[in-house]
Image (cartoon, rainbow, N blue to C red):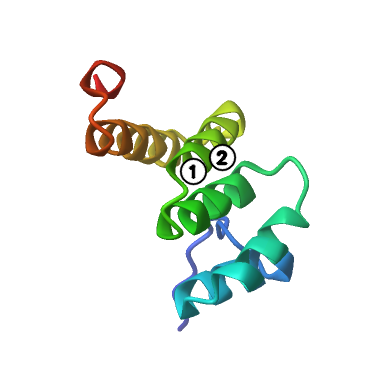
Amino acid sequence: SAFKIDIPAPVRGGDLGLGLDFLIRGDLNKAKTHFESVENDPIAYLGLFFVSLLKKEFDVALYYLESSLEGLKNPFVRSYALLLKGQLHEYLGDRFSAE
């Protein structure tokens, strides 16, 4: 018998899935294009955060992370995004904002 887990998948294909696939492959420009085509989606903003982070565009990365945090409802994903925010602030030498 098959074991079924009834948990919604965070990415179900489309531009989010393609963006994630290109991000994993390291094709940041294509990943950015696909994430940008998804409007007002906190997961797409999180994808854009990682693209910007890998391009070392830290101010842009923080912008996308803040945009993502405004819409994230899942407490696990939200806490992970907050952890990333603190770590990036600390990396940038802004210990006050990191705390």
Residue at 78% from the left image edge and 46% from the top image edge: 39
Give the answer, above or below, for where 11 lies relative to 82: below
| Residue ID for mark 1 | 61
Residue at 49% from the left image edge and 69% from the top image edge: 4
**Residue 67 percent location from the top left of the image:** 60, 33
**Mark 1 belongs to which amino acid?**
Ala
Q: Quadrant of residue 76?
A: top left
Give the answer, above or below, for where 91 lies relative to 55: above
Estimate how packed mark 1 is, as few (under 14), some (14 to 19) or many (20 or more) residues with alpha carbons within 10 Å: many
Residue at 56% from the left image edge and 75% from the top image edge: 22
**Residue 13 percent location from the top left of the image:** 68, 70
Query: Which mark identifies residue 64?
Result: 2
**Residue 34 percent location from the top left of the image:** 71, 65
Q: How many marks?
A: 2
- Location of the C terminus by quadrant is top left
In the visual, does 41 lie left or right of 58? right
In the visual, does 94 lie left or right of 5? left
Mark 1 residue element: helix
Q: Quadrant of residue 45?
A: top right
Q: Residue furthest top?
A: 96
Mark 2 residue element: helix
Residue at 73% from the left image edge and 69% from the top image edge: 14
**Residue 15 percent location from the top left of the image:** 72, 66
Give the answer, above or below, for where 3 lies relative to 11: below
- Location of the N terminus by quadrant is bottom left
| Distance (Cα) linking label 1 and label 2 | 5 Å
Q: Residue furthest bottom?
A: 1
Estimate how packed mark 2 is, as few (under 14), some (14 to 19) or many (20 or more) residues with alpha carbons within 10 Å: many
**Discs 1, 2 touching: Cβ within 8 Å:** yes
